[in-house]
Image: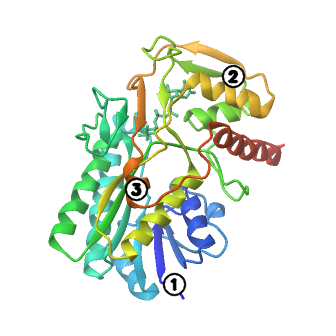
Amino acid sequence: MRPTILVTGGAGYIGSHVTLALRDQDWPVLVVDNLESGQVDLVPDGAEFVNADCGDADRMRALFAKHQVHAVIHLAASTLVPESVADPMKYYLNNTVNTASLIESCIRSNVGMFIYSSTAAVYGTAEGSACVSEEEPPRPLTPYGKSKLMGEEMLADAASAYPFRYIVLRYFNVAGADPAGRSGQPNPDATHLISVACQTAAGARASMEIYGTDYDTPDGTCVRDYVHVSDVADAHTAALEHLMRGAESGVFNCGYGLGHSVLDVIAAARLVSGADICVREASRRPGDVPELVCSAQRIQDKLGWSPKHDQLSTIVRTAYEWESRQRDGKM
Ligand code: UFG
């Protein structure tokens, strides 16, 4: 019997896919989620669910002892960049303070392995390079990025001081849905491009906007590194196996190193759906950088991560299928 893995945020979009990947490999999983943004029906079958806040130290230490938790995968977080600008303290409390408390709970309970979901937002504008490697000095521009980077820094300090190892995964633009249809992005008011395009294609929105067509990019729209959520989930199981082997801590980009523009995404959504998506050109969205694509070398070399869904059409098709089913369920 494999040891239990505790997943915070396992009732959320990415967390539910991580839990699916762990369950598919027969890891016993304990999901801890306060359901602030998660949904209990996203918790995969076979995972145990506890409605709790990962910043509740007494509760977490009791759970670690009761379930003999071996490693923690920490995804619970607030993740909306504009909201973090409007309400920064929410981000420092939910992300930084709760992560500090959770790390401390782990150390006191002798849980010595930790996988942390971080973000490309820690890079800020990544000036001088469109292809960002982990060596790039982090310069987060928003409270969201800063709140996540502080979590990374605490992990590094904890690992220097205690018997504790960690993996940081810096996600780029996570999108798509479980190819078997078991989970997907749950928010009907999503702001992320692929969700918006697929909700529009599925008829849940009348139209969508392109935020800026005058960037210094090949077609004038912003370029991002879209990564399928099931590949992101597999990066967590690869990170877990790496730590289980006794390997050292590390920071890894989680993206493909492939850039796609906003127009590429809309074209893919039109193709997979057959819908004539109504699109309006709008002004630039504050805070957007023209291009953000990662160097994916380190995660492939050191964690042996080999993506399975790195075609834009696959990402968009799985997202569209999920959004269509959500829409059918409401009609
Ligand atoms: N966009 C549109 N129309 C929309 C939605 C988005 O044109 O309706 C554009 C944006 O302006 C941007 C691109 O599509 O140019 C991607 O935007 P998203 O909102 O999908 O994603 P972001 O790149 O802004 O941010 C996401 C996460 C961050 C993370 C970042 C890493 O929200 O947490 O990816 O690259 F840090």
Q: Quadrant of residue 248?
A: bottom left
User: 135 and 155: which one is in front?
Assistant: 135
Among numbered discs 1 and 2, the one appearing first in the sequence: 1
User: 231 and 103: which one is in front?
Assistant: 231
Q: What is the spatial separation of the Cα atoms under label 3 and label 1, in whole angstroms? A: 26 Å
Q: Which residue is mark 1?
A: 2
State the image coordinates of residue 218 (x, y, percent, origin top left).
50, 16
The amino acid sitting under disc 1 is Arg
The amino acid sitting under disc 3 is Asp
Q: What is the spatial separation of the Cα atoms under label 1 and label 2, in whole angstroms? A: 48 Å
Q: Quadrant of the N terminus?
A: bottom right
Residue 53 seen in the figure: no
State the image coordinates of residue 274 (x, y, percent, origin top left).
81, 29
Q: Which residue is mark 3?
A: 301
Q: How many other residues sit within 10 Å of disc 2, few (<14), some (14-19) or many (≥20)?
A: some
Among numbered discs 3 and 1, the one appearing first in the sequence: 1
Q: How many other residues sit within 10 Å of disc 3, few (<14), some (14-19) or many (≥20)?
A: few
64 to the left or right of 326: left
User: Which residue is at a point 39% across and 67% down the rendered structure image?
Assistant: 54
61 to the left or right of 16: left
Q: Which residue is mark 2?
A: 207
